[in-house]
Amino acid sequence: MIIKDVTTTVFRHMTRRHSDSAGHAHPGPEHPVEVALLTIRTEDGDEGYSFCPPEIVRPHVLDKFVRKVLIGQDHRDRERLWHDLAHWQRGSAAQLTDRTLAVVDCALWDLAGRALNQPVHKLIGSYRTRIPAYGSIMCGDEIEGGLATPEDYGRFAETLVARGYKGIKLHTWMPPVSWAPDVKMDLKACAAVREAVGPDVALMLDAFHWYSRTDALALGRGLHELGFAWIEEPLDEQSLSSYKWLTDNLDIPVIGPESAAGKHWHRAEWIRQGACDILRTGVNDVGGITPALKTMHLAESFGMECEIHGNTAMNLHVAAASKNARWYERGLLHPFLEYDDGFDYLKTLSDPMDEDGYIHVPDRPGLGEDIDFDHIENNRVA
Ligand SMILES: O=C(O)[C@H](O)[C@@H](O)[C@@H](O)C(=O)NO
Ligand SMILES: [Mg+2]
């Protein structure tokens, strides 16, 4: 039970996903990206794993904070270990981020599940073993035949419905696309998708994150007319009062916050201030499975749905253990990429989807990631 060491393995993973200057993903030629596998090991030889970008678990962060909190502790004390790390953030000179808390917390949950031979959602207290997915489309681009026009979005939406998705979320065009952002073009893409899929598919928009109040109001009113299920992050989420204003002035549900700091504490303020109709959380956004569960329960206490940001096993287990998440966000998707091809360091998908659009939570222990340790070792860089 006692944590003996915390180590990382950095390895190369081949991907066709590229990040633009705003951090949004787009397709491109295959290229190597470095990924870190964090391993937490106990004296009994049990291990828990979680993946992240190498900088999240760089030596300074592990040496100065993570190892000092974890080593010698009972790995089952996740709540106390999480708070010990969270309290150190204030005095960490901004070096100990929510992303590091998240990867450590996920590895501890994975360790508990692997040690007990149980899936994490069963340890938490499961609500379901399958959940409907919405297809989360990548941000628009200027790639011929990609996501360059409203018609491109419409055509892609048709293929997603044929794959089985019962919900689709658009991310429309944002800088560095030369002419973005553009509310009228956002609405044209949304109208093309609604026209393509008909009235029964749930549609959502995750727009340019820095529109003005007046632009966000016009966008939300247009989406309401198209029967969209929610509008997401059209304003800077640092302005809670702007979201209260927008929520008060729109009929379409406003969801948030996704990217705002403050974990479950700040999300409590969003609810208290009436700044959203649907709450949002995400394991990477709030610092782990532990605080994500707190956020789910917070929302439930106010009769609110709480939708979970992002794919991967960690978010899937939170969804499986929660009643008030309607969807699993499966993405990001693009016409030029085959999501079901998965990752070269996982032997099978962590979020397999059937032809009816349901994700089936793998019955494997821990987070259920089917890790290809040989691939990691053969592609190790540090
Ligand atoms: O803003 C981004 O980087 C992407 O939109 C990403 O976070 C996407 O996963 C998202 O916002 N989903 O809701
Ligand atoms: Mg989003």
Image: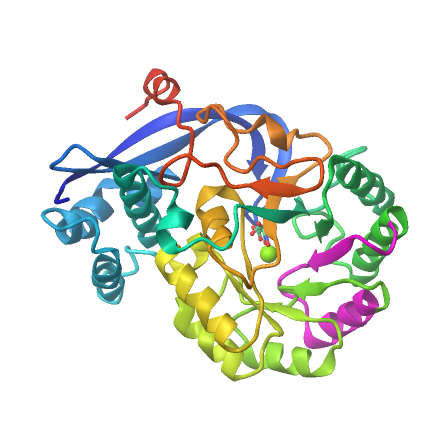
Quadrant of res 146: top right
- Say left or right for 312 vs 353: left
Question: At 42% across and 60% down in the image, what residue appears?
Answer: 292
Residue 105: x %, y % from top left:
31, 51
Ligand 2 image position (quadrant)? bottom right
Report if residue 142 is visible in the image. Answer: yes
- Please report the bounds of the magenta region as a residue range: 198-224
Answer above or below: position of 93 versus 155: below
Question: At 47% across and 23% down in the image, what residue appears?
Answer: 347
Residue 260: x %, y % from top left:
48, 66
Question: At 50% across and 26% down in the image, what residue appears?
Answer: 348
- Say left or right for 18 vs 77: right
Residue 315: x %, y % from top left:
48, 49
Report if residue 261 is visible in the image. Answer: no
Residue 205 part of the magenta-drawn span = yes
Q: Looking at the image, which is closer to me, 144 or 121?
A: 121
Answer above or below: position of 119 versus 128: above
